[in-house]
Image: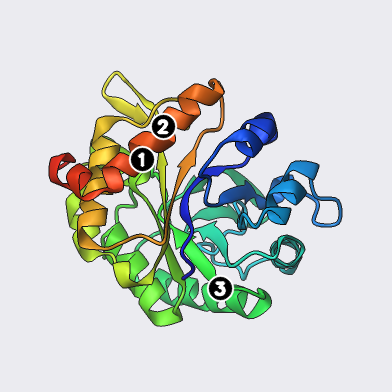
Amino acid sequence: MPDLGVGIGWRPELDLTIERMAGVGFVEVVAENIDPGDLPESLRVLRARGVPVIPHGVSLGVGGAEPPDPARLAHLAACARALGSPLVSEHLAFVRGGGMEAGHLLPVPRTRESLEIVVENVRLAQEALPVPLALENVAAIFGWPDDELTEARFLAEVVERTGAGLLVDVANLHTNQVNLGLSAMEALDTLPLEHLAYVHVAGGHEHHGIWHDTHAAAVPPPVLGLLAELCARTTPPGVLLEWDDDYPSDAVLTEELARVRAAMSPSGQAVGGRDE
């Protein structure tokens, strides 16, 4: 995977902010929000500067029983070509079935039968894309009662069998630990980090004991601690900050990227702490 550095999720509300920020190694754009035939000027500016842009899909649904929609795959492929992207990323999630949209990135049933279907769906997606595909772990709001594998083991087997890249969202690992009791440290120990493409970090808030992964707040210390733990195991090709609402000032975002870099450093790894 390419060396990407530290990046930030591109949003129209942050276009000028990102153009002004120093040290942005790469950006990620939600693929469904752009037209590859008419790219936003800001993305063209960043590309002209040599900043890699990664299309990030949110609706492909490789975790469903039905094969990936050819039109959605064609759109992802067109985005990658238009942006000259080094890779494309998507979620390992269930999003639709029988013509009905879930409206959320839902966890897939982690059974051996489901695994075979997901592996085939990922292979179909890979064949349709001009660049490598990386798969992201999701923040789950529930777990299926018949699960046979942990989330990390399921994702690990998909990645190992398909050769897909791995997008580890440490904020999602934290969310699942708080809300579902799934150990984030065990996940880091299980995931095949040799396939790591890049990492997501984001903020949220806790309300009545439930962690809400809002992408609209500073990254909390437990999530930075998980990033530090991951960096103690491997050197991630890239780490990207997601911020999707209640957009702060340029100075706040610059400070957030500085906190991410600090957590990635050897000293940050020493003091990152275990989120247990």
Query: Which one is earlier in the sequence, the residue at label 3 or at label 1?
Result: 3
The residue nearer to you, when weighing 71 against 241, is: 241
Residue 186 lies in what quarter of the image?
A: bottom left
- 3 vs 2, front mark: 2
- Where does label 3 land, which residue? 132
Q: Tell me the kind of residue under disc 2.
A: Glu
Lateral position of residue 99 relative to residue 247, left or right:
right
Can you see residue 127? yes
User: At numbered mark 2, what does the secondary structure look like: helix, strand or loop?
Assistant: helix
The residue positioned 54% from the left and 69% from the top of the image is: 133
Cα distance in 3D space between marks 3 and 1: 26 Å
At 38% from the left and 40% from the top, the residue drawn is: 141
Residue 142 at least partly seen: no
Secondary structure under the numbered disc 1 in the rendered image? helix
Q: Which of 162/233 is in front?
A: 233
Please provide percent x and percent y for residue 134.
49, 65
Decide if residue 90 is on the left or right side of residue 169.
right
Disc 1 marks a residue whose amino acid type is Val
Q: Distance between the Cα atoms at labels 2 and 1?
A: 6 Å
What residue is shown with label 1? 260
Tell me if label 2 and label 1 are in contact, CB under 8 Å: yes
Name the residue rendered at 72%, 45% in the picture.
33
* Residue at x-position 46% and y-position 64%: 3
Of the 4 image quadrants, the one containing the C terminus is top left
Left or right: 158, with 66 as reference point? left
Alpha-carbon neighbours of circle 1 within 10 Å: few (<14), some, or many (≥20)? many
- The residue indicated by pointer 2 is 256
Q: Where is residue 125 shown, x and y percent of the image?
A: 61, 73
- Disc 3 crowd rating (10 Å Cα; few below 14, some 14-19, many 20+) is some
Residue at mark 3 to residue at mark 2: CA–CA distance: 29 Å
